[in-house]
Image (cartoon, rainbow, N blue to C red):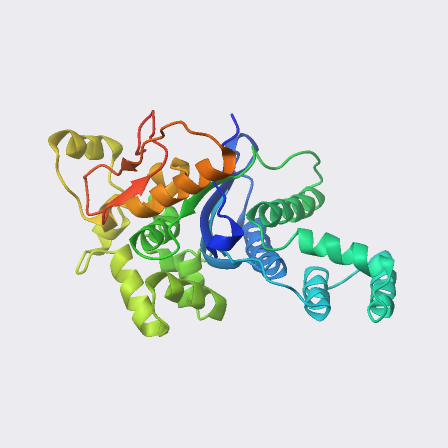
Amino acid sequence: MRQARIKVPAELGDAVYHCISRSVNGEWLFDEPAREILRRQLWVVAEYCGVQILTYAILSNHFHLLVRVPQKTPVSDQELLRRYRLLYPRPNRYQTARLEVIEQQLSVDGPEVCAWRRRQLALMGDLSPFMKLLKQRFCIWYNHAHNRFGTLWAERFKSLLLEPSGHALASVAAYIDLNAVRAGLVVDPKDYRFCGYAEAVAGRTPARRGLAEIIGVTDWPEAQAGYRQLLFDTGATAREQGDAIPLVALEKVLADGGCLPLSTVLRCRIRYFTDGAVLGSRAFVEEQLASYRARTGRRERTPVNLLPLITDWGELATLRGLRRRAFG
């Protein structure tokens, strides 16, 4: 069943989403060269569409994105041309000729320019066109490089609407960057090159900017210290940092009513962070639910669900209750 996506109305400003997409049949298709191409395309398509990558993780059969979609603002023709050239750095003869016509007609606002402008703007400032363009471009490259055809992706992407700042944003960001740790690929996420945290540690400015925004500071050393403390318990040993908590052990903690450090819980697969529809403070979730009801006319009494008390969630709540295991 297709998952309904809660969308923030434009008048409410920026929106932050956690998105996840998987390869067809969950097959391990993405080797290191493929992950590198997807990493590069991710940044290019994000700049073209005008969305901000806060952090990400690319693995062998799926990827996670934490993206901020700004409120739509007018985009000048010169900026449209710059983004178009960014998306097509080596245009074919047809694209080159078409672009020459567009540039010639810009001053008179000819019909070719108007149609071209509408097509470009339709791909900008919205999550769905961004994800569609990213997945399409990567699929074209992958099929050509591997002499295959047909779909590469299992389904439409999942998305979770997040409160755009605070505890929910930081927790989901850390959860995304810890993907390679949960998979047993590395002990420290800084050693996994296909995630936002490793790219920020390596010195790339857009990745550092995203993590600094997550923590809520402008100084990178301060952001690095705060984010790393969220990723790992202070003073934790390397072995403890690398071990994902077993599902049976987590279920025992739940059954006993115990509590674990947040950085430990984030090493588990937490379905609230992918399937909860909306995640944030109770007030934020209730606000999004009220807005959704007002736009759709639906009046069913959907309850707001507080996350189970196994760690200090900071009063996080989710819109969708999970029928199956919330973890694992």
Q: Nearer the viewer, residue 208 or 188?
A: 208
Q: Residue at x 37, y 73 (%)?
A: 218
4 to 57, vertically: above or below: above
Relative to 94, say whether 217 is above or below.
below
Q: Quadrant of residue 230?
A: bottom left
Quadrant (top left/top right/bottom left/bottom right) for the C terminus: top left
Using the image as rendered, state which of residue 40 and residue 102 is in the foreground.
102
Q: Residue at x 65, y 43 (%)?
A: 139
- Residue 267 showing in the rendered view: no
Residue displayed at 56% across by 40% down:
29
Q: Nearer the viewer, residue 33 or 50?
A: 50
Please indicate whether residue 93 sits to the left or right of residue 133 in the image: right
Q: Where is residue 94 drawn, in percent x and y?
A: 86, 57
Q: Position of residue 313 (x, y in %)?
A: 23, 47
Query: Would you say 211 lies left or right of 77 here?
Result: left
Quarter of the view holding residue 91? bottom right
State the residue in front, 227 or 37.
227
Residue 68 position in % (x across, y down):
48, 56
Residue 228 visible (yes or no): yes
Count of labels in the image: 0
**120 on left or right of 293:** right
Give coordinates of residue 287: x percent, y percent. 37, 45
